[in-house]
Amino acid sequence: MPGPEGRRLHVVAAVLEDAGGRVLLTRRTEGRDLAGAWEFPGGKLENGESPAAGLARELHEELGIAVDPADCSPLIAVPFAYADKRILLDVFRIARWEGAPRGLESQALAWAPPERLHRYPMPPADRPVIAALRQPGCYPITPEPGDDHAAFVERIERLLTAGWRRIQLRARRLDRDALRPLAAQVAARCREAGAELLLNGDIALARELALGVHLRADQLPGLKRRPLPEGQPVAASCHDADELARAEALGVDFAVLGPVRPTASHPGAAPLGWDGFAALRERTTLPLYALGGLRPDDIAEARRHGAQGVAGISAFWPPAR
Ligand SMILES: Nc1nc2c([nH]c(=O)n2[C@@H]2O[C@H](COP(=O)(O)OP(=O)(O)OP(=O)(O)O)[C@@H](O)[C@H]2O)c(=O)[nH]1
């Protein structure tokens, strides 16, 4: 068996959705690792197979359905290190198939609504896959608001009109009394649009205004537990394995990891590159957004390295009018 430092096993898996948007899970049978866990159907790629062809073969063997490899589109590829092996869990959405899925290997099947997926015991590598089905692929972080708060709120409105459904309000130079009315105004706009708002750094104000919070990396060591209840989102900024482990232990919902590329906002920080990002991804189950010199159209590359997607300031913030 390859050790944790050995070559990565390439595992392909499928998201099959029924007409109601429910997702098919299969249960791992006795005698295999992670027996009893629910997972996305699929298995190990064989030598020389393309991922889509290998997935079509697995789905035929396990479920008796016929899938054209051209109908498999990449969702997310998660590099993950178990104690005894490293895998790349390469997950595809299947647009259409022929036949009704049956458990041909005596495995139980379940159709689960996406919002209930987290209630099924699934392998740790699947957590970022569930997040890819439920959380936004990209989101903007604001620059400092400056003095003209009306112009700032107008740009927030443009982000919401453009369809963004999560925003981080990052106003580190405003004291709490100056930030409170601005955050309340931005929060009201986000609520109307059905978007999630995370306030950078200020846990007390996030509590007061019933918002989410984005924790700075230097806040993590001082916290013993998740600072807000479930249902109020908590995220964290991370740059290395220690910070990711702290954020995971606190029970945050997701982390932002970077910088992936050199960035003007953090000129001194050494970029991780995509390989560095993927190496850190292997050691945590947290959903991760890549940050640092990235744009919304980097999402496909981010997903190939196990990120949910991309977050950023400059490439997202609309120009002044
Ligand atoms: N199919 C599938 N495998 C997953 C998922 N998540 C995850 O960590 N894996 C891991 O990826 C590997 C898939 O290999 P496999 O299904 O061929 O099963 P296996 O290792 O038991 O081998 P075997 O079928 O030859 O006994 C397993 O180690 C499994 O735990 C998932 O959602 N779907």
Image (cartoon, helix red, strand yellow):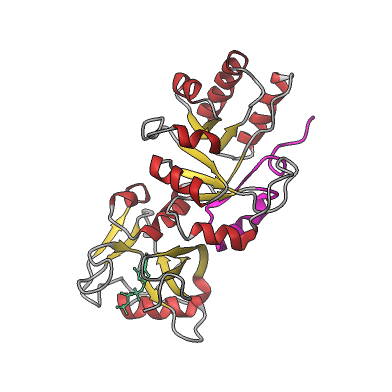
**Which residue is depicted at the point 60% across and 63% down?**
275
**On-image quarter of the C terminus:** top right
Q: How many marks?
A: 0
Residue 15 belongs to magenta span = no
**Which residue is depicted at the point 44% across and 48% down?**
245
Residue 88 visible in this rendered orientation of the protein: yes
Answer with the quadrant where ligand 1 appears in the image: bottom left
User: Percent from the top left, x then y, of residue 290?
Assistant: 59, 51
The magenta segment is 292-321
- Of all residues, the one furthest to the top in this rendering is 177
Quarter of the rendering containing residue 217? top right
**Which residue is depicted at the point 69% across and 19% down?**
149
In the image, is residue 147 above or below residue 95? Answer: above
User: Percent from the top left, x then y, of residue 233?
Assistant: 44, 35
Depth check: give the residue in front, 149 or 5: 5
User: Percent from the top left, x then y, of residue 58?
Assistant: 38, 78
User: Percent from the top left, x then y, of residue 93?
Assistant: 46, 64
Quarter of the rendering containing residue 110? bottom left
**On-image quarter of the N terminus:** bottom left
In the image, is residue 319 above or below residue 38? Answer: above
Depth check: give the residue in front, 190 or 176: 176
Depth check: give the residue in front, 228 or 94: 228
In the image, is residue 221 above or below residue 210? Answer: below
**Which residue is depicted at the point 67% across and 53% down?**
271
- Of all residues, the one furthest to the right in this rendering is 321
Residue 309 belongs to magenta span = yes
Q: Is residue 228 left or right of residue 63?
A: right
Residue 306 visible in this rendered orientation of the protein: no
Q: Is residue 26 left or right of residue 128?
A: left
Q: Is residue 23 left or right of residue 32?
A: right
